[in-house]
Image (cartoon, rainbow, N blue to C red):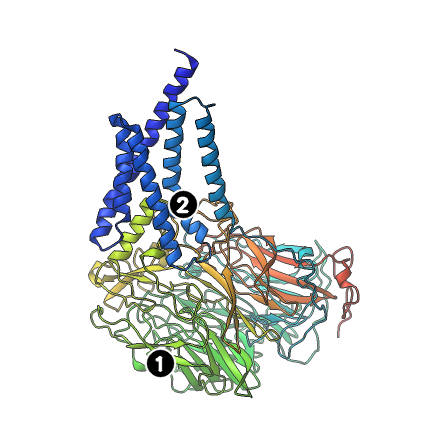
Amino acid sequence: MTDSHRGHTAWRWVYLIFAALVALMGLAMAVLGGWLLVLGGTPYYLGAGLLLVAGGVLPFLGRPLAGLGAMALALFITVIWALIEVGSKGWLPAWGLDLAGRVGVIAGLVGATALSYLFWRTSIRSRGSLAALAGVGGAAVIAVGLILGFWERTEDPSGLVQASARADVAGDSAEEWTHFGGTAGGRRYSGLSQVHAGNVGELEVAWTFRSGDASPAPGRIFYSSQNTPIKVGDSLFTCTSSAQVFALDPTTGYVRWRHDPGTPPEAMEQLFSVACRTVAYFDNGVSGSIPSIPAVPGVTPAISRTGGGCERRVYVATADGRLIALDAVGGYVCRGFGQDGVVDLTLGMGLREPGFASNTSGATVAGGLLLVGQQVSDNQRRDAPSGVVRAYDAMTGDLRWAWDALRPDAQAALDPDDIYPRGTPNVWNVISADEELGLAFLGTGNPGADHWGGNRTETEDRFTAAVVAVDLATGATRWVFTTVLHDLWDYDLGAQPMVLDLEIDGQSRRAILQGTKAGDLFVLDALTGEPLRPVELRPTPQGGLLPGERLSPVQPRSVFYPNLSGVPGPEPERIDARHLWGLTPIDAALCRIEFHQRRYEGAFTPPTLDQKGMVLLPGTVGGMNWGGLGFDPERRLVISNHSRLPNIVDMHPRQDVQDRSAGSGGTRPDQAIAPQSSTPFGVTRPMWLSALGVPCLAPPWGYVAATHIDTGELVWSRPLGTGYDMGPLGIPTRLKIAMGTPNLGGPLVTAGGLTFIAAAQDNFLRAFETATGRLVWEARLPAGAQAGPMAYEHQGRQYIAITVTGHARFETKEGDYLVAYALPPTGPDLTGVPNGAAADPDGTAPEEEGP
């Protein structure tokens, strides 16, 4: 046998193997396509599947050319069908990836079969073979080009130099960053402009800090610190998931002091995510600025640990219900606060289990008070701990008032043996305040059960998913605006209410901007709660009610601004079968089958026992969530980021729920079904993923956008995040295709015309030009950064800092980092900058004189 003959024989077997694979693929598509057709779906899968079966079987019957013809026809139909489906949705961003997912596997199998036939039947050096290779190669180049057309590129910022003078705005952060959102108003804006589009490309790592804090029980205790540090005076303060507090030198990241409260692991086990979003800072104004403590590697500062002083304090809350006051200079416990330095947040809560309710967003300091809300482990029981918000004296720790939806008098004393009302809407996000108006602004969540409200009172409904203004001095409710009526979808308010000034009809108005999981931007008068931009009540789906449940016939919709729950646009996105997707025809068909089996009629499709359950879009992560919004007061742009990731929600009758709830011996990691005890139903609500672990909804899965606050115009939007660190079956693709990923963590907007944001499921910090949305810089991070960046200036140098600890529930890489970026200390942009020179060459801060 000649070598040529043996080669041809080998290619024949290769050809037949590929033909068999085509037949198997076609068979699966035909079976699933038939099922889909019965459910009212597209006939494509059945038709294309039958053609592929024929194309794969005919070669075994001695008709190879006819088989290739059937395959070619199937591929042609696939391409036409895919183009029609992708195009009829409006050529969404990342449409190339969408198209590749619909066509790629079939094209690859058919192309491989055709080439192997060609090599079997002809010499590999023949003109026909070479022409075929050239054709296939050209097609591959075009396909890759389509995909790489969405490659995330950093724009060349040369020539985009902007003014580097500081643009301070009253009330916004400049040199310091004193709250989670910069200030108590939550605008996430820095008045610093030393870093701008003309020099952002020169940013480099100035220092990296590692806390050493890691989950004591991975898989049972889910870390995600979500922390935005604060910077006051000569120190940067940060906290970790277990509430360890560090004071760092802002120039070098060296540790000035550390406090470990020893949070017990059993208290952290009940939390969905163990977080410490921020610490709080208070200065009684007695002793001036914070004195400098030199931070030198390996040297512990000589600080008194007696507990005296404490005029400047840092506060941290722990998962087991302690609010601890620490001296901001020395890090020791302030013994005059509460009981020996600690306020017991469990008093009056009737927790049943440690960690069932705890503060994860940090206290807000306003009017000499510490405003403390709490997360309550959701969907455990209807009689969960109270959603009470409490105000404590920042110096003594005395309770000043306790607000709750069912407490008409926030200053009424609680009897020693009594508890706050059970199961009421809680405030788990960051609280905002305006000392000038004497008001605090609360964004509320849901009562004890998210997805069943048959026994909620009218008062509970009024205060669910609502913006509530309370009097700072008394805790009395001043007004309430409900964003979702009788919320059954977990559309609680995660984003911090933002305080800002607007001009309405020629008159300046203090306003509250509230972003929601449902994608709305509501603008409300800060004094009255009156909508300052049009809000309409829109009809919502009815019928299919759970026994004992009720529905609101309408839901409020902010119509002046775009909806930011799906693809940004004037109306909330409503998907259909065309929006579904897979990496292969098989997982795509399975997603379509499930879609047709479930109920879906838009964002307010009610939970149901009919069909297989329902599709929830926006999903439980939103829309907009706890990262909050950013606001550029000069460009009048609201910067938002949101996810576009559906969940599937199944309600389980009580007799089918075996899982015990928290407080009855159950813990979240052990539950197959969230029990919602004391209601007729348990619930499961996983992210809607295909058999390969990718969303059933075609990308993008996350966006960053800019909306003009005065005109309502969507100025720009773009997918946020790539598949570099994620992929099918959890395998990173290492492809920087801007397809958009689900995201958690807010933006930082600066006077330098830049928006910094991480948040996505890839490990990058990015800078966008705020006015245009152009990507002008990105930096690779050592782990996931589900947190909001912050900016500060120290010794004449501007820093951008971000917490990089990952998010276990979000399945991003975990770590223990805090990374700060700055321009090179000798760079030309630092010359002539006010307020001092760059840090000393050895990287340590020079010692300053005390007060």
Say which quadrant the C terminus sits in: bottom right
Q: In which image quadrant can residue 614 be found?
A: bottom left
- Label at residue 462: 1
Q: Is 330 placed left or right of 626 in the picture?
A: right
Residue 103: x %, y % from top left: 38, 45
Q: Residue furthest front?
A: 127
Tags 1 and 2 touching, CB below 8 Å = no
- Which residue type does callout 2 highlight? Leu
Question: Which residue is nearer to you in this view: 563 or 658?
Answer: 563
Q: Is 829 placed left or right of 351 in the picture?
A: right
Question: Which residue is nearer to you in this view: 358 or 131?
Answer: 131
Residue 690: x %, y % from top left: 35, 50
Residue 347: x %, y % from top left: 43, 74
Q: Is residue 602 visible?
A: yes
Residue 752: x %, y % from top left: 66, 67
- Label at residue 355: none
Crowding around mark 2 (Cα neighbors within 10 Å: few <14, some 14 to 19, many 20+) is: few
Crowding around mark 1 (Cα neighbors within 10 Å: few <14, some 14 to 19, many 20+) is: many
- Label at residue 729: 2
Q: Is 53 placed left or right of 819 in the picture?
A: left
Q: Is residue 418 visible?
A: no
